[in-house]
Image: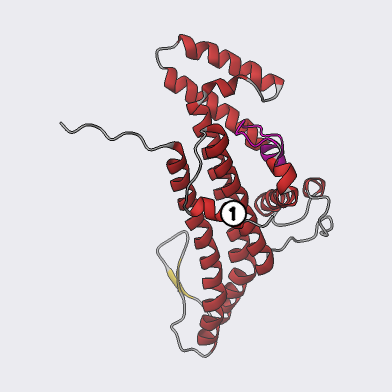
């Protein structure tokens, strides 16, 4: 029987996870430009009747409707203006939060003692009860996962800036983000607020958005937009913050310097 391979060091696992996340960000940018480039071409072909009319299966039955070309042209305009840019932003913020959550979960699993502090008073009380059960339970791993899930959920339900500026997940950030990239953190806050408006308020600015993004030029009830320059800056900001978070966790939590790779490259080239 061959001996089992030794586990990969944390900096490699985190770097691999970032590489997957980085590809997702690049895929979002590519898909956005795929739509921007090819849909106008398709628009012209449809207008000149050089391609077949769209056959649209009925949502609630077996019928198939042949769409009028004007309706299809309207659908293309809708995708370009409302669907592609907004969904690009929503997915980018969601994937970035997923990577940051991965960092928090990994650190809590490797260093459960970091769960013993932080969080609000009610949350700490609930978690302390769970911890008491955990240490007395035969299924310690399962109980630990429940505590971690509760803590991470609480962290990401709070103010987005707290993850970076207050280091709520105890990832060794210190004052790195407040000193080196406060503007990027403020941009992250606005990105999360805009994402929430797009998902929960049909893209209309509400008072919650104005509270969370006081520097915004949007007015109450105005329809929020996502154009190419904004999306580019958003993707670079999200990717840069995630790269910085990953490198700092490797160096300050695991005492592993990241020698090379995509994550280190993004960290070094990040211009907050």
The crowd level at tag 1 (other Cα within 10 Å; few <14, some 14-19, many 20+) is few
**Vertical side of 3 occupied by 192: above or below:** below
**In magenta segment, residue 42:** no
Could you say which quadrant of the image residue 8 lies in?
A: top left
Colour option used: secondary structure
Q: Is residue 265 visible?
A: yes
**Vertical side of 224 occupied by 15: above or below:** above
**Vertical side of 22 occupied by 165: above or below:** above
Q: Number of labelled discs?
A: 1
The secondary structure that most of the magenta stretch takes on is loop
Q: Mark 1 points at which residue?
A: 268
Q: Residue at x 48, y 27 (%)?
A: 110
What is the quadrant of the C terminus in the image? bottom right
Q: Which secondary structure lies at badge 1?
A: helix
Q: Is residue 227 visible?
A: no
Q: In this view, does 3 lie to the left or right of 186?
A: left
Q: Nearer the viewer, residue 151 or 258?
A: 258
Task: Provide residue 117's location: percent of width, then percent of height.
Answer: 64, 21
Stretch of the chain drawn in magenta: 161-174
What is the quadrant of the N terminus in the image? top left
Q: Which residue lies furthest to the left in this view?
A: 1
Q: Nearer the viewer, residue 199 or 32?
A: 32
Q: Which residue is drawn at 46% across and 9% down?
A: 136
Q: Residue furthest top?
A: 136
Task: Provide residue 192's location: percent of width, then percent of height.
Answer: 68, 49
Task: Provide residue 100's location: percent of width, then percent of height.
Answer: 57, 42
Task: Provide residue 88's location: percent of width, then percent of height.
Answer: 58, 60
Q: In this view, does 80 lie to the left or right of 54?
A: right
């Amino acid at each position: 029987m061959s001996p089992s391979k030794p586990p990969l060091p944390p900096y490699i696992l985190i770097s691999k996870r970032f590489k997957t996340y980085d590809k997702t960000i690049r895929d979002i940018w590519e898909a956005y430009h795929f739509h921007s480039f090819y849909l106008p071409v398709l628009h012209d072909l449809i207008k000149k009747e050089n391609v077949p009319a769209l056959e649209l299966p009925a949502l609630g039955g077996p019928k198939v409707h042949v769409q009028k070309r004007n309706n299809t042209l309207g659908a293309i305009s809708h995708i370009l203006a409302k669907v592609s840019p907004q969904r690009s932003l929503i997915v980018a913020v969601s994937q970035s939060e997923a990577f940051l959550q991965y960092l928090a979960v990994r650190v809590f699993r490797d260093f459960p003692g970091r769960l013993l502090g932080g969080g609000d008073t009610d949350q700490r009380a609930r978690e302390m009860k769970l911890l008491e059960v955990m240490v007395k339970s035969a299924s310690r791993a399962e109980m630990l996962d429940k505590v971690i899930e509760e803590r991470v959920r609480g962290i990401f339900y709070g103010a987005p800036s707290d993850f970076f500026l207050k280091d709520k997940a105890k990832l060794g950030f210190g004052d790195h983000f407040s000193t080196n990239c406060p503007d990027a953190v403020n941009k992250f806050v606005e990105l999360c607020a805009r994402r929430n408006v797009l998902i929960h308020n049909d893209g209309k600015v509400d008072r919650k958005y104005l509270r969370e993004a006081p520097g915004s030029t949007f007015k109450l009830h105005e329809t929020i937009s996502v154009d190419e320059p904004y999306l580019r800056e958003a993707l670079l900001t999200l990717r840069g913050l995630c790269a910085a978070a990953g490198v700092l966790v490797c160096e300050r939590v695991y005492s592993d310097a990241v020698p090379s790779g995509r994550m280190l490259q993004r960290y070094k080239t990040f211009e907050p």
